[in-house]
Image: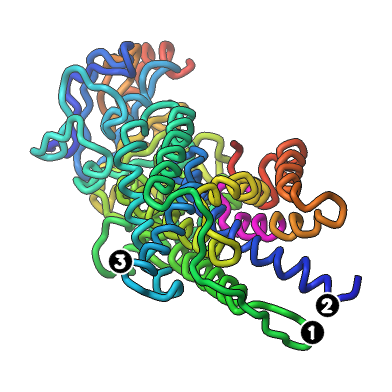
Amino acid sequence: MDMHSFINFFLLPGIVQGSIYALGAIGITLVFAIMRYGHFAHGDLATFGAFIALAFTTVLGLSPYAALPLAVLATGVFAVALDRLFYAHLRAMPKIITTIASFGVALMLRSFVQVVWGVNTTSYTRGITRPENWFGIRVKSHEIVTLLVAIALVVALHLFLTRNKWGKAMRAMSDNPELALFSGVDNGKVIALTWIIAGGLCAASGFFLGLNTELKSLMGWNILLPTFAAAILGGVGRIEGAIVGGLIVGIAEELSVLVIPGEYKVMSAFGILLLVLLFRPTGLFRGKVL
Amino acid sequence: MTALLTMKNLRGGYGDSDILFDLSIEVAKGEIVAIVGPNGAGKSTAMKSIFGLLDIRAGSIAIGETDITGWAPNRIVKAGICYVPQVKNIFSEMTVHENFEMGAFLRKGDYSAALDRVYNLFPDLRTKQKATAGRLSGGQRQMVAMGRALMLDPQVLLLDEPTAGLSPKYMEQIFQISRDVRDSGVAILLVEQHAKQALAFADRGYVLAAGRNRHEGPASELLADRHIAEMFLGG
């Protein structure tokens, strides 16, 4: 295989898919860092975000790219509401209860999407996008946008967490929740902030998944396993880990078709998850132990 | 001397079991008060009760004239009480500087004066501002922990076993810094396992046993009392 086909057929699609996983995995890792449970409704929340963006394009007649920021914001606020409704009153109980509750929320979200938008496949734009050709490297415009927006979101999050007072409070809460309370941090506000960020990034991941493939009610559920694999591979609670983990899982999935049939792609995420849990449960960046 | 922090006839514990039965402690502005006593006497629990971390069933806690019994931790911090737990007392993945910034979380506006004062108290840390707090030595971590608590200019500083596991050199340093903090007008209440050292350095002391006051008085008198020494201070 020559260099160009490796880049065009494996590396680039892997990086694009990996960025989508990374956006979801950052949310999973943040929720775990602050609230200490695995959020299994994250995939279906991504579906919800993707369809909210679709609603903005059909109802308001916006272009998909104009609908994205609105969907990110709406899903962030929606995630705060989900937390208040379904998770807040479970806070003092064993975390496994909230984890199971999040499965229930996943089913509700999926049914909601199916009732409102149906079960058929749809898309943001009709027709086929022709790839640009740069020195033999073929890349579609929406792939470039996916990468640029993912990078911009990650940089913005990094700046927020390292420069902003409330961003630092989030890190403090993740690091040592009791001491954060003793320093006067209001944990209710930190939790709401976490959901806005995790929900917003989740909507972005769903949107880009829909943009690069298609929209369907099971789209988010289908990426839940690779997204969790990405978060765990990077080290739960580690944002840089979620990004690296997402890219590795995305690229590994694309490369796996060299050895296994394409319809079993998702097995590579499962394989990575298995290996990490067996040999390095804290992940590449030494995250919190599950 | 009027008391700044007053714990009066406290009874409380966790869940259904009581640990404190009848505990009364007072700390005035500008004094260091040590709580000593055998293991399981309720020393650390006494301190945690101030911070609303256990169920208080009887008695009261006040700062000045304000009753703070049962308040949430972030309200108690605002009332001017800062607490340095014995373990997990720093943000270990954050830098020294960020630890101090978190200490100043409730402050509005510029806090560079407080920051400067903390670095003057702990000059060793001035060159380590960007270091990850969890990677420092035990003594330096304890300094970060105290520095974080001092960023709010508390009226009362609670120290839970501040010298546990430290070398004699650091122990002496922590004691000296505590005296400096006291002399700036802060009331310090500390719990110590090393009873003799603690009483040698404190102004007053309380000897606790089984969740009750057993003896109290000027630290030097407690130290000199042969009966107390035999019973509680390890001979």
Magenta-colored span: A235-248
Chain identity of mark 2? A
Q: Residue reaching furthest left?
A: B65
Between A254 and A272, the residue placed more toward the observer is A254
Give the residue pinned by disc 1: A136
Asked if residue B179 lies in the magenta stretch, the reply is no
Quadrant where the N terminus of chain B is found in the figure: top left
Q: CA distance from mark 3 to mark 1?
A: 57 Å
Say which amino acid is labelled 1. Gly
Q: Which circle's residue, 2 or 1, is located before the other in the chain?
A: 2
Chain identity of mark 1? A
Q: Position of residue A41 (x, y in %)?
A: 47, 42
Give the residue pinned by disc 3: B111
Asked if residue A243 lies in the magenta stretch, the reply is yes
Q: Is residue B149 visible?
A: no
Callout 3: SS: loop
Chain identity of mark 3? B
Rate crowding at label 1 as few (under 14), some (14 to 19) or many (20 or more) other CA atoms within 10 Å: few
